[in-house]
Each structure stands twice: as structure tokens, then as C-alpha cells.
Image: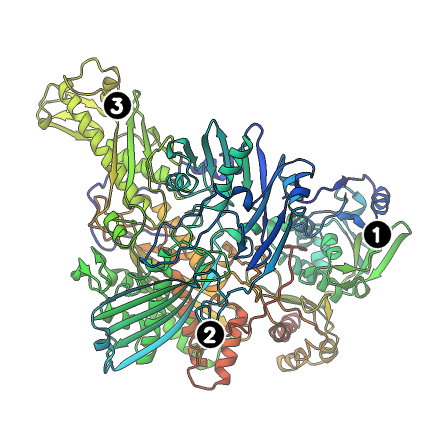
Amino acid sequence: MIPVKFDYARPGSLDEAVRALADGGEDAKVIAGGQSLLPLLRLRLAYPDLLVDVGRLDELRGVRDEGTTLWIGALTTHDQVLRDPLIVEHCGLLAEAAVTVADPAVRHRGTLGGSLSHADPAADLPAVVAALDATITARGPAGEREIAAADFFVDYLTTSLEPGEILTGVRVPKLGSGWGFRYEKFHRTAQAWAIVGVAALARRSNGQTNMGPVPVRARAAEQAAAGVEANLAALLSAAAHADAEARPPSDLHGAPDYRRHLARVLTGRALAAASRV
Amino acid sequence: MSTGTETTGTQAEVPQKEFGRARPRKEDARLVTGQTTWTDNLILPGMLHIAYVRSPYAHARITSVDVSAARSMPGVIAAFSGADFSGEQGSLPCAWPVTPDIVIPAHPPMATEEVRYVGEAVACVVARDRYMAADAVSAVDVNYEPLAPVLDIRTALDDGAPKVHEAGNKSFEWVFQNGDLDEAFRDAPVVIERNYRQQRLIPSAMEPRAVVCSCVGGEFTLWSSTQIPHVLRVMLALVTGVPEQNIRVIAPDVGGGFGSKLQVTAEEVLAMLIARRLGRPVKWTESRSEGNLTVHHGRDQWQRIRVAAERDGRLRGLSVDLLADMGAYLMLVTPGVPLLGAFMFNSIYKMDAYSFRCTGVFTTKMPTDAYRGAGRPEATFGIERTMDELANELGLDPLEVRQRNWITHEEFPYTTISGLTYDSGNYEAATARARELFGYDQLRQEQAARRASGDPVQLGIGISTFTEMCGLAPSRVLGSLAYGAGGWENASVRMLPTGKVEVVTGSSAHGQGHETAWSQIVADKLGVPFEDIRVLHGDTQVSPKGMDTYGSRSLTVGGVAVLSACDKVIAKAKVIASALLEAPPEEVEFEAGTFRARGGGAAAKTIQEIALATFAAHDLPDGVEPSLDSDATYDPDNFSFPHGTHLCATEIDTETGMVTIRSYVAVDDVGTVVNPLIVDGQVHGGLAQGIAQALYEEAVYDDDGNLLTTTMADYLLPSAADLPHFTTDRTQTPATTNPMGVKGVGEAGTIASTPAVVNAIIDALRQFGVRDVPMPCTPERVWRAIQAGRDSGTQAQGTQPQGTQPRGTQPRGGGAR
């Protein structure tokens, strides 16, 4: 890796990290597992002056049972997410999606917080967090703040984190035991990005990966699915609305019309699986 | 995986204990632990690092290059433009002028006046470390006057098309004809014509290219991640004018090549010039993205294939017309690659007439050159796709059509319509075995049931009965094809005083396992333990003579040279043994490492004892030199012709277009097997690469000639997770053209598998009116083909979603996970 020269800070506490980041200004970036940032540094598509390594901050670790919600620390790796007993029990959709992220090496280094902060629309977990109506917790110079997932993702690679703010964790509502879920990821090779991904929580919510510059909530499909009979025909008819809100990108792996078609097919499949039809 | 069953043929003449044994490879410990020295690991005192400034234009005139700002950057020692090397950089070589009137444009290692592909080097900076060098690249100021790019070989020869070179866009036209084609097509009951695309591929060796060069007192040592240290040395001397004896080339352990390191690169030549200019050693290592732009690419053809046949499926004639994309320049064997396919389109089939025409066309893209299989995958794809089409046209089973046309095992040796003499083969046996392992009949039944029920997941069965020419090559044949060198290989065997053996080979390994296989050959031949043998290669000072490794030639040519050198050692040792055993040489016999006089009782001398006695040289007969060391140079009389039958079952999700390989059976006949583990590894890797061409890989340039697939997020390679369990097996029909009966296996899997997969896809989709899906058969293309086929009703329409593909892609950093 031959990146542009940068300074490196590894603070011992969250307060220190927030200060370092604030002092670094616009050209400072947070690094955790590095699985998003390092490739950008390598290609010199990102060239921060300062990297603030949050990898040793205990405040960003752990999974806490808060009663009706779970708080998942930003440093929780994808591999931990997919194995954590609390997440598996109360938020299985997140665990199911984490299994599909890249490959084992990336899953052992990459973190939930890193993936959300990077806000790549092709990444799997933002759509899941959106579908779960989760809340992002962040700490900045002005203190703690909670941001609804719907407000967190602003644009391609852009979040509503303020300069100097660090994503500290994600608060997700526990799913009751009755909720079926499914993450349908469509990709060409095991390690490849999702061409389209659909995170469905049975007949309640539907979040989509790579169907727009930010994770898409397919509200029209959600409304169409809400309260319908759990039979295939009804679910497929709801899924026909799955691309209503989408603004799909065009790249080598799929033109927009194909992505729209995939979103409808995958939504039908995810709904059927989540509804155990 | 492999059961290694021998279902036909006989054992070759050396069925001793190492031959045929699945030895784990002795070189792997150092390779897989990374403890070996790769070129990029080398650190020489005072070494500087080169970074290249590369053209962002597919085609442009260079109006100015200003390196002065870069020179004043921190750590920068020097910066050069192409003009700084004029007069000494020469032109990168093309060793295969395939026709007398071929156009071979000048190819300066660093562009001076015009750039003709994105990534062509226009300047470089040399700095104390690689970071400083990379930083200074952006300080080099280059001005360009853009010219029109030339991106499509189908229109590049049109009147008024922009020119890549002053002489135009045509490099050569090469033709071959045998038999009366007009007669074959006249009144033929069946004539079909198909057009196929061989997409452009980017070789992706695990180790990127890297070069280190030092120049001390006018003597050069060049380390390179190359397949061809010997060829490279000769070519560097010719290009730079440095006397050959003053150039030493070292290919240390090399992490794969697949043909991409069968090249004389700009970076190798420039490393020499810069090291000499600065009097300091220099290093250059490409990044993966730089490599995707500038490692030579593979394939890239349009094929027009016409076939005339009888109603019963028997072939009358075959006509092949190729357009082959040369890219911007002709590199080492660029024009010869498509012609290696000229002799293979007729494959295993008999016919009355054949014509082949290939036009080499220049474009403003990275030059193409050898990539695993080189010409033969293209040919095999063309004919095997066409045989399926013919079967469909006639309503016959595709295996049946092949059987009606192939050379039967009693007919060998058989001289084909393209003039090659196949020495041996048994296509019936390989096909029967593959059919059995595959469960062909059951799968056909399942296919019918799924069709009848309208299952959204349809099943397809693909067939590829292939052969290839390996063991490149008889020098006389190469001469007749205007190739610039011979096809022999050299080896020497040295008996050390302690009875150990050093084997020096001109076959330069880059992952194949030569050290293990050569040790097995020598262990059996000399009767010494496998562990006592060391194989040396890849350094022109250690192994001064060789033709290197490509074209599945190592075992069939280099291995035979090793065997011949052993024969000479034994002959020399026998003279000495005869003296020590006090028996005439004609009565001394050698077996399993020991010399005995016939009827001489227990008296015996091992070859190790002879080695020690030769070293001491106390009691040698008069006139006998005190050395057993021997070398041999072997030039094959003929190619070898591995063959096999590959069967592939694909499941196609018709709602999304996703193709999944459900099962894959490869029955290969590579002749006698030295090491089944190595053979299986080659087959597995080859299958992965061939399947990747069918489903995943494609180098994509946009309408301005920018390469869009510069990272592995855009240039997709499959991993083990994407590939099926391979069922591999072998039939063994030994080659009769070499003493070991071996045929070569490095490319077989790649050559056979691509058409097997695509045939399976089309077999599943033909019911929807789909006749072709361009490679790679991405889910989107498969889905669109199904839509187009359905839209056009029951008409059998070819679908070419090419061009409807979205061209823009955002640069992805392999980013968020």
C-alpha cells in the first residue's frame, strides 16, 4: 500500500479521540478495522492528513441488553455480529446480513461502526440498520447524540455525522420472537458487492442495498405488504412495488432497469422467506 | 477428488516408484510461508524506486513533458521523460513476424511522441523510497493533444477510421487452407454460421510484476518476476545493445504468470537504462491497478465460423474467419497467439476441407499476448460451441454429433485437416468415463422434467470434447511459422561427491512444481532418493541455457531433457563402474541405482559410489575424464496432444439470470502422469480460470478508451466459494512421441472448460429462443437474453446484449464492508 503521507493518532479514550478528530479538522479521518478506508488510501482516492485510530477504545466495544433495545458498540466486528448470542437472538436480521459481508478476513477486521460511517450504498449493513429503524449513537465535541437511521445516511459515502463526531454504536429495537426476517443478497461472486440486497422484516419493513445513493426504505412495498395474508401471491403482489422509491445506480454489474427487476424479485423472495411462506 | 483411475492405455516404460506418486511439492514450504525471496523482497544497498507517469489518454500526441518540478520533490533523485532515453531505449521486441508483410510498429519502452493506450508510460520518477516516488508522479506535467481512439476491431479497418499507427490499423492477414472448401459447402445439406466473441481478459497472477536491476561496471543483474529469464536475457541484449554476456537475468521464485510474464516489458528495459544512468540499483513493483492497465491482456477476438455438414451430422467443411485485437503494439508473441488456434479449430474431428483466416488489428488498448491456453481456448470455444449448434440444428444429442465426427482410437496416428499429426488418443474412452461420472442420462431426464414443469430454475448440460497441442515446440515447425526462436529445452545433471544430485533446468518454474516432478524423474532414472535431489532454475548464471516455461512445454520438453541428461550420466558412470567392477562395459548393467556385472555375483557399485570415485579420480581408466556431469538439449519431433471430455451442468435462475454450476466432470488424458497431485492442481486451477472466462472476467474499456476494470471489485475473479466441487479423473493414453509418454497439463482445464460452461447455459436457455450469451455470462446478460428470446417468440434469435451494457462505473475503492 502506497498511500499519501498522513499523521496517525491512537488515543486512549473516547474524549481524547473526539479532541484529536476535532483538532484535525476536515482532513482528519477515523480508522477502525480499515477495511473500507485502507483500499481508498491505497488507491489514493482518500488522502487524509490525520488518521485517528479508535481501535483501542473500550467505550466503543460490547453488546448491551437495554431491555427493549440492544446497543451494539461501533467496534463490533462483522464476525462478532454474526456470532453474538444477543444479536442472534434479538436481531437475527443483522447477524444474517453480516454473514454475507465480503470474506472471513474482512469480517474479522471490519466493524459495524466503520461500515455505517463509510456509508457505501453497496455495503450490506446500512440497509439492514435502516430496515430495523435503528438509532446511531455518536459522540462529538458537543457531547452525545442519537440519530435515526433514516436521517443518518445523507448521500453516497456521506452521513449526517458532524465534523469531529465519532460513531459510537447502534441501538436496535429487539425483534419479538414472532418476527420473520431475511437478507437476500444478489452478487456475482462470494466476495463481491451486492448488485442489489434486500433486507426484509416480515410484512413490516424493507431496506435495500445499492438501490440508490443511500439505503432505500421501500415504503410502497411495506405498505402493500402490511397486513396482507401471508400467501405467496399476496406477497409477490406487494413486492411488485419494491422499486418505487429506488434510484438505482448503473455500473458494470447491472443497469438500473435490471436492478429494479432484481429488487422486485428479491423482495418477493425475502418476504416469502421472512413470512415462512 | 480424483480417483486417478486408469481406464485405458498401458503404463509407460518407467513405472518405478517415484513416477506416478502423489508427492507433496517440495517447493511449497518456502512458497506458501512467504519465506522465499520474491523480487519485491529484494533490498540492495543504495536501491532507488521507480514510479511511472502513465497516459490518461487512449490516444494522444504528447506536446510536452516537464519533469523539473518532480525533480525537486523530497527524496527524488531523478525524473525522466521518453526523450531522455531516445537513442538507447530501442523498441520492444516482437519475435513472431507471422507474415512477410506484417506491420510491426516501433514500440519505444517509454513513449516519446504519441501514446496509444491508457497506461502507456510517458515519464518516470526515481526516488529514495516508493512513497516519495509515488508522490512525485503527480508533479510531472505532461500535455497532450488528444487523438481519436480506436476501440472496436470490427470497424477499425473501415475506410476513414482513425489510425492507431501511420501505417494503418491492419497488422497482418494470415491464411491457411486445406481441402476444397467450395466443394464441401456446395450442396451441403446443412450449413450453419455463428459469430462468437472472445472477450478481453486480464491475467491475474498472484504476484504482481516486479523488477530490480543493478549495473556495476557495465555488468547488469536484472531480477524479474518473469517466466522467461533466458529469452529475456537474449532480448534485452538485442533491444539495448548491451552485450549478452554482460547481462544476468534472475527469475527468483515467481508467483504465477499464466502467460502474462512471457514478455519483454518496458519496465524491464527501462530498469536497465535507469540503473546504468544513475549508477544505483533500482526497483519497480506494480500495484494491482497499474497491473490491470499494463500487464499484457489476453484473448479478444471476434470469430466467424461456418460449418457444412451432412444430415447425419458428419462434417464436410469448416471455415474460420477471425479478427484478433492486437492492442496498440505487437509484443513478444502477440501476432502468433491467435495462430496457435489455427491448427486447433478442427479439434478432434475429421473433415474434408478447412480454411482459416486471421486478421490482426491494432486498437488503442493495452497489447494482447499469451494468456493460459493462448489461441487454443479460443479455437476450442469456437468449435465446441458450433458442434452444439450443429447438434441442435439436426435434432441430435450433442455427444452423438461429436462421436460421428471424432477420430477413433484405431485411427492414430492421424494427420488432421490442419496438417498436425496426432500421435495418440482415445476420445471414446474419455467420453465414456465422463458420461458415467456425470450421470449424463439421469441429468437429461431431470432437465426434461424441469422443462415440462416450467421450473424457474432450469438445468443445462454442456459438453466440451477437446484436444490441444502442447510441448511447444519442434524447432523446425516454429521456423516454418516464422517464430524467432527454437523450441528445444536444456537440462544438466551434476553428481556431487557425496552422491547427491543437482539438476539444472532451463524450464523456469513459476508455480508449476518442477522441483518436485523433476526430482521424481531423476530419482527413478538414477536410482537415488527423491530427497537427495536439488533442482536449480531461473538464473542465467546457474542455468545458462533454456527456453523457459509456457505452452505446457516443461514436462514434455524440459522433462525429457532431464531424462536424457540422466542417460548420459549413467553412460559415463558405466565406464567407470566397469573399471571398478573389472568387467567389460557391455556386461555392466544398471538398475535401481546400482551397477552390476552380468553374472558377476554380488559385486556391485552404487551410482553414489561411482560419484565419489569420480570425484577422487584415483582409479579411472585411461582417457576417462573425472566427471559424470552431463547436459542434454532436447528438441521434440512433434507436439503432444492431451485431450479429454468435460461435462458441466448449470442451474439457471431464470428470474434473475444467475448461473450456478451444479456439477463439473473433467476426464483428462494427459498421458503418463508423473505426479497426480500436481496434475490435479493444474486441472483445478485451469478449470477455475476457464470458468472465470465463461462467467466472470472481462476487461472493459469505455468509449474513450479508459479501462474501467482496474480493481478486483470491477474485474471479478472467482474464489473457491464460487466454484463447484470438481470431479476429475483420467484416462491414460501415453504419448508416443516422447520417451516418458507425457503430454502436458498446464492449460487443459482452461481450454476445455469455457465452452463446457457456455454450452450448458445455452442448453438450458435454448427453449426460450436463446442462441448465444456473450461472455462473461453475467446474470444481467443471461436475464436479458431470456427476455429478448421470449420477446422474439419461438424464433431462434441470437442475442447480443453487448453494447446495451452500461458503460459508466464509479471508481470503487473496494471500499466499505
Secondary structure of the residue carrying tag 1 is loop
Give the CA separation, mark 3 to mark 2: 64 Å
* Picture layout, residue B14 above or below residue B164: above
Secondary structure of the residue carrying tag 2 is strand
- Give how far across and how far down residue A128 sits, in percent: 71, 63
- Give how far across and how far down residue A215 sits, in percent: 72, 66
Is label 3 in contact with label 2 (beta carbons under 8 Å)? no
Q: In which quarter of the image is the C terminus of chain B?
A: bottom right
Q: Can residue B592 be seen in this view?
A: no
Picture quarter containing residue B63?
bottom right
**Numbered label attached to residue A165:** 1
Label 3: which residue? B608
Marks 2 and 1 on same chain: no
User: Please, what is the three-letter code of the amino acid marked with disc 2?
Assistant: Gln
Q: Which of B696 and B528 is in front in this view?
A: B696
User: Please, what is the three-letter code of the amino acid marked with disc 3?
Assistant: Gln
Is label 3 in contact with label 1 (beta carbons under 8 Å)? no
- Give how far across and how far down residue B49 sits, in percent: 59, 37
Count residues near mark 3 (Cα–Cα under 10 Å), then give few for <14, some for 14-19, many for 20+: many
* Picture layout, residue A103 above or below residue B543: below
Judging from the image, mark 1 belongs to the subunit labelled: A
User: Please, what is the three-letter code of the amino acid marked with disc 1?
Assistant: Glu
